[in-house]
Image (tube, helix red, strand yellow):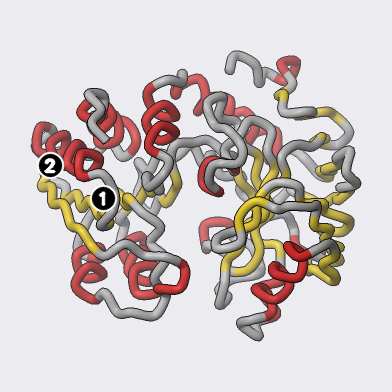
Amino acid sequence: MANSRWPEWGEAIVNMMVEAKPGENLLIVTETGIDRQIGESCLVAGINAKVNTQLLAMPQMVTSDADPDFSSTAGAIVGANVIIMLGSAANESIARALLESRSKGGRVTQCEPLGAEDWILEGVLDVDYPRMTEVARKICLLWNETDVCRVTSQLGTDVSFRLKGRPALLADGRAVSPGDADFFPGATPSIAPVESTINGTVVIDGTLDAPLGPVSAPVTLQLKEGLITSIEGGDDADALRERLHSTGDPKALAVCHWNVGISPRAQMGNKMAEDEMVMGAITFGFGRQDPIFKGSVGNAKMHSDVVLTSGRVTLDGAVMCDNNTLNPDLGLGGL
């Protein structure tokens, strides 16, 4: 897909999203099937910034490709200071390499361009990114001071949990400090609620993680002390239940993070990576928990996200967002 804006996009990714510096080792990992212009735009931008830049292409992966050993790619990742992942990275050897790189001070940001080219382009270039980052930062400050958060929806979601004591993550898509990992375009401020305090009902009307996709009818989860105790609904509920139980790992049923999307350009129904970013969309993650969240779930054999299209979020009784609108009285306007 020819698009004259890819060079501008590549410059934004290298200079804004990862802030690559002269002398750093920048690795861009793309997949077959992804428009070559996308990876090459980052390659050229890195070279222009006098960064030691390499572009590596690997076979297109899906969630069933978790087992093949891509050791050559993994080695390149471990040796890089900065990694831009263009693709799903649905592979265990790649995931381990990314964690190892970060443990040594590397930083990584990721997007999934295939079928979402307009979104990743517009979500970076056609938003006020500094303002979006500032709003995300204000949300994090609010969460840091919140004892009890409650999430409700017209479909029946009613779940509460404690936030205080857990780090709130900016999650604006940028990876600019040692050990950073994020997904772009952003933003979706994220946090791991105190697991033992998570109780209530979550009704999913948006998206289930790949390979399941958008739901055809609401799926209802009952949560007790941070664990799924029941999954009810139609065929989508059956598929989610089967997937979470397939590993035999009880941690696959544990809430590992919660986040709220704040991108004004994201639209629901295109792809999970975009659905999570929709203004006011609510995501619950289950299973494998990144150490950066400082939660109690830890490693697991699976990570799976679910997205609610909308909801009402209150922080110690004060409304943070409702019906996909952030509360300007809390300083969250301007997007």
Q: Where residue 51 is drawn, which disc sits there?
A: 2
In the image, residue 70 sits, relative to residue 182, either above or below, namely below
User: In which quadrant of the rendered image does the N terminus lie?
Assistant: top left
Q: Position of residue 164 (x, y in %)?
A: 74, 47
In the image, residue 137 sits, relative to residue 331, either above or below, namely below
Amino acid residing under circle 2? Val
Q: CA distance from mark 2 to mark 1?
A: 10 Å
Q: Where residue 55 is drawn, which disc sits there?
A: none
Q: Where residue 82 is drawn, which disc sits there?
A: 1
User: Is residue 166 at all visible to an observer of this figure?
Assistant: no
Q: Position of residue 269 (x, y in %)?
A: 60, 41
Q: Position of residue 51 (x, y in %)?
A: 12, 42
Residue occupying image coordinates x 79% and y 28%: 322
Q: Position of residue 80 (x, y in %)?
A: 21, 57
Residue occupying image coordinates x 78% and y 69%: 227
Name the N-terminal-most of marks 2 and 1.
2
Residue 22 occupies quadrant: top left
Depth check: 271 or 69 in front?
271
Residue occupying image coordinates x 82% and y 28%: 319
User: Is residue 39 at all visible to an observer of this figure?
Assistant: yes
Relative to 118, 290 lies left or right: right
In the image, residue 138 sits, relative to residue 80, either above or below, namely above
Residue occupying image coordinates x 85% and y 36%: 316
SS class of the residue under badge 2? loop
